[in-house]
């Protein structure tokens, strides 16, 4: 009994020793990982996933993110008065991979056709030569913003999109001018 116990504990000690030896570097780095993890904030806040409707205002801020989303999909403005719109990119990714812009199209514009044309306009940051454009921001990357001013003369519904390839299916909305 006693001998068995000794052998057992020796084996245990040996394996513990070997494990601690072999993993000494790993356990150090996992300690670092752990402390980093505790200070980490959740990657995806639920608030950013649901698009919201704004109240009527001609001073607008629209946020875009690394999840290919605008934070609003319906904007209400007053027709015939200057609109100041700021697009912010609250993500971290560069404009080459997760670039965003906001293009306001004329009422009744064919959004699908416009998006198609935008794909061919890489040299101009995916902003095609088109009479359907009312106004557009610059193409921006994480941490950047672009401000534009324009007026929607007539009451109506105006589509807006991000024309970066593949984004318009998710990044779209309507400006309702009253
Ligand atoms: Cu985009």
Image (spheres, rainbow, N blue to C red):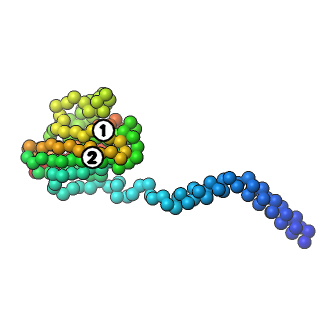
Query: In this image, 149 relative to 48: left or right?
Result: left
Residue 161 visible within the image = no
Q: Residue at x 25, y 35 (%)?
A: 112
Percent position of residue 43, x then y: 44, 54
Mark count = 2
Question: Where is the N terminus found, in terms of image quarters?
Answer: bottom right
Q: Is residue 123 above or below residue 33?
A: above
Residue 16 visible within the image = yes
Residue 87: mark: 2
Residue 139: mark: 1
Residue placed most toward the observer, 6 or 41: 41
Residue placed most toward the observer, 173 or 65: 65
Percent position of residue 50, x then y: 32, 55
Q: Residue at x 38, y 36 (%)?
A: 96
Earlier in the chain: of badge 2 and badge 1, it is 2
Percent position of residue 11, x then y: 83, 61
What's the CA distance linking mark 2 and mark 1?
10 Å
Q: Please, what secondary structure does the residue beneath circle 2 have?
A: strand
Q: Residue at x 30, y 50 (%)?
A: 63
Residue 12: mark: none
């Amino acid at each position: 009994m006693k001998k068995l116990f000794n052998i057992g504990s020796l084996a245990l000690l040996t394996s513990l020793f070997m494990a601690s030896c072999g993993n000494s570097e790993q356990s150090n780095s996992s300690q670092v990982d752990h402390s980093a993890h505790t200070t980490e904030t959740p990657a995806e806040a639920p608030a950013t996933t649901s698009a919201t409707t704004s109240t009527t205002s001609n001073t607008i801020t629209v946020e875009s993110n690394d999840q290919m989303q605008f934070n609003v999909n319906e904007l209400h403005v007053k027709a015939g008065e200057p609109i100041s719109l700021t697009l912010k990119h609250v993500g971290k990714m560069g404009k080459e991979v997760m670039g965003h812009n906001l293009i306001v199209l004329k009422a009744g514009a064919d959004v699908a056709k416009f998006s198609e044309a935008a794909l061919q306009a890489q040299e101009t940051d995916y902003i095609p030569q088109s009479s359907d454009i009312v106004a557009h921001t610059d193409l921006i990357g994480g941490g950047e913003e672009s401000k534009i001013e324009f007026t929607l003369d007539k009451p109506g519904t105006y589509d807006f999109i991000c024309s970066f390839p593949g984004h318009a299916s998710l990044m779209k909305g309507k400006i309702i001018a009253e």
